[in-house]
Image: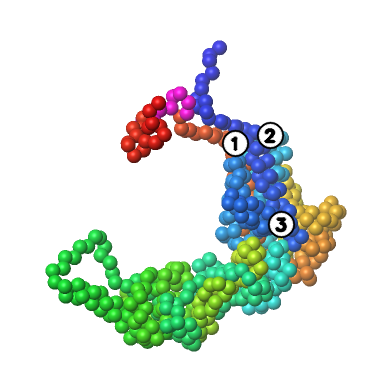
Amino acid sequence: MPAPVLVLNESTKRETGSKVYHANIQASKAVADIIRTTLGPRSMLKMLLDASGGIVLTNDGNAILRELDVAHPAAKMMLELSRTQDEEVGDGTTSVIILAGEMLYVAEPFLEKLFHPTVICRAFAKALEDSLAVLEQVAFPIDVSDREMLLNIVRSCIGTKFTSRFGTLIADLAIDSVNMVAIDLGNGLKEIDVKKYIKVEKIPGGQLEESKVLKGVMFNKDVVAPGKMRRRIVSPRIVLLDCPIEYKKGENMTNAELMNEEDWSTLLKLEEEYIQTMCSQIVKFKPDVVITEKGLSDLASHYFSKAGVSAIRRIRKTDNNRIARACGATIVNRPEELQESDVGTGAGLFEVQKIGDEFFTFITDCKDPKACTILLRGASKDVLNEVERNLHDAMGVARNVIRDAKLLPGGGATEMVVSAALKKKASSIEGVEQWPYKAAAQAFEVIPRTLAQNCGVNVIRTMTALQAKHADENNANVGIEGHTGKITDMKEAGVWDSFGVKAQTFKTAIEAACMLLRIDDIVSGIKKKQTGPKAKTPKTQIEDDKDVDSEQAIPE
C-alpha cells in the first residue's frame, strides 16, 4: 500500500464537509442568541466591560457586537452584518443578526439530509426575491410633511430603546435635526448627510429634558483673548479661514547672518508688518468674528481686539465645515483672496457660554442652516453615550423615511405577512427547492416569536393565534404589541417600520446566510512563521559600553 501523501504543512488545520457547516451554524446561532433578548420594548440591557475597565451599558445590537471579541471566523462575519446595517440604514442591527441566525438554523436539517448547499441557497434567494415583492405590496406611502406620522415612526423605532421613557424628546430631536440638514436635489431626491453635518455634543450635567437642537452650531472653544474680545455679538459677520495668522517660519532650517544692529530691528519690524498686512486684509471686510483652523499669534490677536473683532483659533476642520453650512460663509485659504461674498451673514447670534468648567462657543439663530448641533445633557457619561446611540438610530430612521417615504406595519406584522405569503407560494415551487423555501418562510417568524418571548407571554399560544389571524389576507397589520405581548392591530397602535430598514434587513440577513452556507472548507494556520529548532537564530547582539548592565559588569 502506498504511503499517504502530505500536501499541506503539518501546522495547517483543515476542516471540511459537514463539520464546517455545523460549526458555522453553531457559531452564528451563538452570536444571534447573545443579542436575542435585546429585541423589542421589553428588551434587556447588556453590560460590557472593555479592556481599559470602562463599562458599556446598551441594548443596541451593533454597540454590543462591536465590543465583542470573537474567535470563530463565521461569528466575525455575523458581527460585520450588524456594522453594515448600521452604516447603511442606522437601525435594525439586532433584527438582522437574529434573522440571519434563524435562516442558518432552519437550513441545518437539510444539510443533515444531504441536501446540497447550492440548492438551499437557491431556495433562499427565491424567498428573498418574493419577500421583497410582498414588502412592496404591503408598504404604503406617507406625507413627509405630516409631523405626527413621522413622530410615530421614529418613536416606534426608539420604543425598544433606553430613552423610550422620555416620551417624544429623542424623536423630536431626530426629526428636527434631519429636516434641518436635508438638501433638495430636485426630482424628488434629497441629500441627507447625518454623519457630516449633525454633530452631537454631549455635556454631562443638567437634565435630559434640557437637550435641544441648535439652529446653528456649537463647539468647545473660547475666544483667543478673553476680556479684550466680545463674547456676545448679535447678527455677526463671520470670516472662516484655514490658514495660520502668524509669521511664516522657514520651511527648512534658515540661518540669517546680521552684520548691523539695526538689521535685527528691521527683521522684527518686517515680521510685524507681515502680520499687520494680513490682519488689515481681513479687517477691511468689517468682520465681527474670525475663525481659523490653524494658529493665531499674539500680535494678530492684539490687532483684532483693537479692531473689535473676536477671534477663535485651532478649530477642527469638521466644525469649520459645519459653521460654513450654517451661516453661509466660505472657508478661505489665503487672507488676500477674501471677498465680500465669503463673509457669512446668516447667523443671528454669536455667544460664548460657560457650561460646567468649560467654555463653549454658540453660533445660533441662523437663517436656513444646513448644519446643526444637538446638545445633549444628562446625569452621567454612560447615560449620555446610550442616548447618543439611540439618537443615531432615530436619525437613521428619520432620514430613511424622508428619503423613501414608505411605511410598513411594525411589531412583527410585516414578517408574518411575508411568512404567510411565502408559505402559500411554496406549494407551487417544483422539485426539492420547495422544502428549504418553506423553511425560509418559517424563519421569518423568528422576529414576532422573539418579541413574544421578551414580553414573557406564552409563545406557542401567541404565535398560533397570530398565524391564524394572518391566514386571512385582510389582517396584514396584525402584530404583537411589544409591551404586553397581546395581538393588536399595528395601525391603531401606531407602530410602524421604515420600508428602507426592513428591505435592507431581509437582504443583508439572507445573503449573509447563503454566503455562510456555501463555505465547505476552513483552512487555518496558513504560512505560519517557523518556530522550533528550524527557526533561524537571531544574530548575536554586541553590547556597547552604554548598554552594559552595571551589575553584570562587575567581575566575579
Q: Position of residue 336 (x, y in %)?
A: 29, 78
Chain-order first, disc 1 or disc 2: 2
Numbered label attached to residue 114: 2
Q: Secondary structure at mark 2?
A: loop
Q: Position of residue 44 (x, y in %)?
A: 74, 56
Q: Amino acid at mark 2?
A: Leu
Chain-order first, disc 2 or disc 3: 3
Q: How many numbered marks does the figure carry?
A: 3
In depth, the one of 522 and 265 nearer the eye is 265
Query: Which residue is found at the position 68% from the left and 54% from the top?
Result: 47
Q: Amino acid at mark 3?
A: Leu
Circle 3: is it few (<14), some (14-19), or many (20+) Cα within 10 Å? some
Q: CA distance from mark 2 to mark 3?
A: 40 Å
Left or right of residue 514: residue 302: left
Numbered label attached to residue 45: 3
In depth, the one of 262 and 27 nearer the eye is 262
Q: Are marks 2 and 3 in contact (CB under 8 Å)?
A: no
Task: Identify the residue under disc 1.
Answer: 520
Q: Name above or below for residue 408 compared with residue 124.
A: below
Chain-order first, disc 3 or disc 1: 3
Q: Are marks 1 and 2 in contact (CB under 8 Å)?
A: no
Q: Main secondary structure of the magenta part?
A: loop
Q: Is residue 221 magenta?
A: no
Query: Which residue is found at the position 32% from the left and 73% from the top?
Result: 246
Q: CA distance from mark 1 to mark 2?
A: 13 Å
Q: Secondary structure at mark 3?
A: loop
The answer, for residue 501, to whether it is visible in the render is: no
